[in-house]
Each structure stands twice: as structure tokens, then as C-alpha cells.
Image (tube, rainbow, N blue to C red):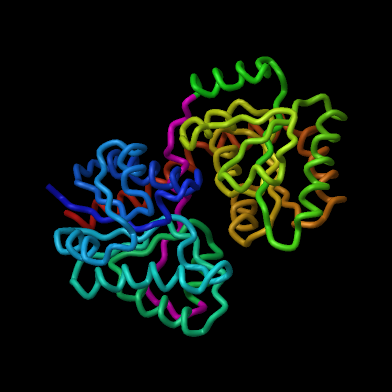
Amino acid sequence: MTNIVLSGYYGSGNIGDEAVLAGILAGLREAGLSARVTVISADPERTIREHAGVQAIPRMAPCAITRALLRADLFLSGGGSLFQDVTSARSPYYYLTVLRLAQILRRKTMIYAQGVGPLQRPAIRAAIAKAFNRASAITVRDQDSSALLREIGVTREAQVCADPSFLVEPDLDAADRIISDAGLTGRDIVGIALRPWPGHDEWLADAARDITALCAEIGAQPAFIPMQEPDDAVFGDASATLRHGGDPRVAKGLIARCRMIVGMRLHALIFAAAAGVPFVPIAYDPKVSSFAADAGASRVELGDSTALAGTIRTTWQDREALARKLASRSAEFRESAMLPARIAANLLT
């Protein structure tokens, strides 16, 4: 049987990254790959429990990683935002080390639906360019990532695709039960997916209150949908909180049942686009700006309260037309998300 090793920010309780993993696995199956997949994870037991059929090894176990790579026919780096040095310089070096080890062991390597950047440190930019130029294939999830790779000296073509999480099927039955238990059945729900961000605690607290007030103004029910545990601190006093238990399928189902999403979390916005739900993206990071541009959504800059209120009002007013526009692109998003899976399958033929 074919062996694939997969490296990403998995097993850490981030619903977006777990959605990426679920989408990659779904894409590989749809592309016809019958493979034994080993995931490098922060919590291998959790990864095995939450993603049926995979094996998993600890991310800080070099011997186990080396053994897995020696058996591998293909190494996939991604998806997610692994190669950025804003939150930490150690993170990109870790993922580069695993990628370079696979290359040293002469495994086929693929950059899988990565969102690359920001990259500020010259040494990291140079190291990424060197490793990516040795990859068998490169796919990135937005045009900005492709442009950045060219800027830092990557000469191998980087094909642009949609995020793998577009391939995750929503669990609408579970979502409906959660909404019913919260007493929100039949309500026009505005889902809110904020997150903490350094230096913006006061603005985020104000934004949470403003969004609640705006929902009352437009006759909608605000509901907080946390995508990771720290998000609770931003909107802890929400009148309703819809919890998905860390299951990306349930989270996607909850967002599909909303009439509008206001969010910072990238995968809350991706889930909305996949379900044809209009969204207001709050751009705290270039990845949010990139996706907003790709999806044709009007973004709000973090800290701009006036723009936030205005964009929520106009998006709500235009929600039916915006929903139709997003729904018309659902097949396009899904087909684009399948691109890296098909490339991976071709590498193994």
C-alpha cells in the first residue's frame, strides 16, 4: 500500500487546521488514492480518534518521524499557514526541518495548499526558497502566497487552489440539534467568530458589543461560534454560544445554518463561502484579506469600528443577492480544492 506522511498544525485543537486535515483526507480519497496516511500531530491519540483511518506520530519525536519518512512514498507539507514568521520564528524552522529531512531521504515532497507569509526574516525567506525549489510540486491557497514565493526566489511553479476545508461535508443534523438546544430554531442567526489579537483587547470587546447591538437593530440573533478555546475570552457574554465539540463537520454545519457570519477566523469565513452564507471578514492577517478578495467580499480592517458597522448593515441588506453569488461559485471552490489531491495522485503514478 502507498504510504503518505502529512505535516501540519494538527492535534492542537484548532478547528480550522482540523478542517484542513479532514479536507485533505477527503480529497485524497476522492482522487482515488488508497493510502496509509501518517499524520505528524501534537496529540496523536486525538488525531487518530477524530480522523478515521489515519495513523499519527508525535511532532517532537524525530526518530518516529524519520522512520515514517523512510517508509513514505510521498510527504505532504500542509495545509494551513505553516510558513510565516509573525507569530514565531521557531514555527517555520520546525516545518522546514521536517520538509528538508524528507528531501534528504529522497522522498517525493509536495507543498499542499499552503498559505505562505508574512515572511519578514531574510534567513527564513532564503531557507523556504531553497526547500520549496526542491519540492516535487507546490500548491498554495491564494494568489498572494504565489506572488510572495516568486518574490523570495522560488522558481518552481506554485499552482493556486482553494483551501482543502471546502471538501469537508457539513453535519447539518448535529448542527440542528445544537441550535435547537440553544433555543434558536427558526431564528435568523448571525454567527460571530472573533479571536484574541495582541493590542486589540479593548477594540474587540467594543466590537462584540457593537455586533450584538447591530443584530438587535436588524432583527437577527447573534451567536458566538468559537473556533478555538481562546476565542471564548473575546465574546464570553454572548447571548448564545454554539459549540461544535471540535468537530469541523459540525462547525461547518452550524455556519451553514446562519444567515450571515461576522468573523476574523479564516475557516469560519471559508465555511460560510462554502455554504453560500454572506460574511463580513475582519482582516487581522493577510490570509483573511486574500480570501476576502478571492471570494469577492468587502473586508473590514481590524480596529475600524465605523467600517464594521457599515459593512454589517450593507451585507445584511444585500444578503439574498450575496448568498446567490456565493452559491453559484460552490462547484468552482470545490473543484479548485481538489487540485492538490489530483496532483498528489499523479505524483504517485
- Looking at the rendering, which quadrant does residue 92 occupy? bottom left
Residue at far left of view: 1
Q: Quadrant of the C terminus?
A: bottom left
Q: Residue at x 79, y 47 (%)?
A: 205
Relative to 204, is 161 on the left or the right? left
Q: Residue at x 53, y 34 (%)?
A: 251
Relative to 218, is 290 on the left or the right? left
Q: Position of residue 163 (x, y in %)?
A: 47, 49
Can residue 90 be found in the magenta stretch? no
Q: Residue at x 63, y 45 (%)?
A: 231
Q: Is residue 298 above or below residue 273?
A: below
Q: Position of residue 248 (x, y in %)?
A: 47, 37
Q: Residue at x 78, y 42 (%)?
A: 208
Q: Position of residue 182 (x, y in %)?
A: 65, 20
Residue 336 seen in the figure: no
The magenta segment: 151-171
Q: Is residue 344 above or below residue 158?
A: above
Q: In front: 86, or 245? A: 245
Q: Is residue 86 above or below residue 29?
A: below
Can residue 153 be found in the magenta stretch? yes
Relative to 299, is 72 on the left or the right? left
Q: Position of residue 81 (x, y in %)?
A: 49, 60
Q: In front: 118, or 143? A: 118
Residue 347 seen in the figure: yes
